Image: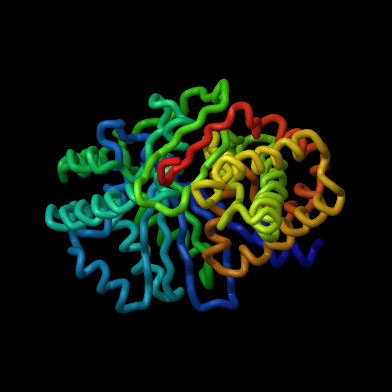
Amino acid sequence: MIAQTHQLPYSGNIHRTVLDNGIVLLIHTLTHVRSVVIAGSVRAGALYEQPAQNGLASLTAEALMRGTQSHDFDAIFSALEDIGADLSFGTGHHQVGFGGKALAEDLPLLVELLNDTLRYPTFPERQLENLMIQRITELRYSQQDNRYRAEEAFRKHLYPPEHPYHYSSYGTIDTLQTLSPADLKAFHKKHYGPAGMLLAVVGNVEPVKVIELIQESLGGWRNDLQPDEVDLPELVAPEKQQRINVVLPGKTQSAIVMGTIGPSSFAEDYRAALLANSVLGEFGMMGRLGQVIREDMGLAYYAHSRLDGGVGPGAWSISAGVAPDKVDVTIEAAIHQVNQMRETLISEDDLEDNLSYYTGSLPLRLESAGGIANQLIAMERYNLGLDFLVNYRELMYRFTREDIQSAMRRYLDPERFVISVAGPSA
């Protein structure tokens, strides 16, 4: 265990600093690489937009690199290409995430560009027009995509209109067409700031120099307009099972998405639910769902389950792609597998296999600097502690077959499923 402690990031080799403006900085040194990776987030996700302006947060984030007060679009990407670096932004409901990579000696330039795009974007009108055309074209194409439409209907019926998760962070054709450069500028002015910002730096770096660099660039950032973190409204699973059929004429396949509200990543039984989901529809050839529905019964092109987790109560869902005349029997088969796990303990072999999978795959996720950086951000966001990784095996092996059954019974009740089917008319 001592050797593992020195190989994995832990409290003895992660440097955690909180700047005066509230930015949490996490640094981990890797001397065997030449590169450096940055990852982090700012508190400016889709929760902070109004439904009538759905897509505003993600469009703002996507436009950050389209021009700043000191760099136009070409200059930003030329500066990155000249040193073989990259930098990008993406939006979720709670956060705008970012990530970048460069050679260690080019970290100052990467941080300079991060600071410039985060704090001083200009949202050029022509660039916004191009982004808008691209996004609306993607959304129009998605209207004929079975899986997209099934997932959309599932989300909208699982979460009520007063809940932020009812809405996609990507926006809709109607809402996007109402947005202007002034809207993006106003959103950025109010919501982008250091409060709640996380930043991880991993690679061949000296922590003291990194702290000085980040302090010099981002340490003076202030935004008194930045609101407090949004509290999600209380949410309960649907009272009864409901079925939604989205008819897409001319399609030869139907997509099924079914499930209900799962635990957030803060829940005490979240990892027990992760193990349950692995058994149900992830491990090996997509767990029991893949084995029974796809391999044994030959019903589906794909069949698996997913547990979203996250800051809020994400969905716990089952997805399958089937021929239209196999929809009902596939739904019945999936519900049967769920009920079996709710009623009967999994075997000791199933428990051991899935525990081994989760603990054995951890080192693979940490082989790259990027994997470590993302893990550091997750540890900070979910209050896991700096020793989470070295204690991970012990944490996971505490779970029993009874814990897995309890998580299934608590969250995954077929009587409260939302079942969404998108495809040709029955």
Residue 240: horizontal and vertical position, in percent?
Answer: 57, 23
Among all residues in the image, which is located at the extreme right?
A: 348
343 w.r.t. 275: above or below: above
- Answer yes or no: is residue 195 visible: no
Question: Who is closer to the viewer here, 173 or 424?
Answer: 424
Q: Is residue 51 left or right of residue 42?
A: left
Question: Who is closer to the viewer here, 135 or 117?
Answer: 135
275 w.r.t. 405: above or below: below
298 w.r.t. 34: above or below: above
Q: Is residue 422 left or right of residue 113?
A: right
Q: Which residue is drawn at the image coordinates 42% and 51% (left, top)? A: 97
Question: Who is closer to the viewer here, 175 or 105?
Answer: 175
Q: Which residue is drawn at the image coordinates 55% and 39% (left, top)? A: 258
Residue 171: horizontal and vertical position, in percent?
Answer: 31, 42
Q: Residue 55's image quarter?
A: top left
Q: Which residue is drawn at the image coordinates 67% and 60% (left, top)? A: 285
Q: Which residue is drawn at the image coordinates 61% and 42% (left, top)? A: 329
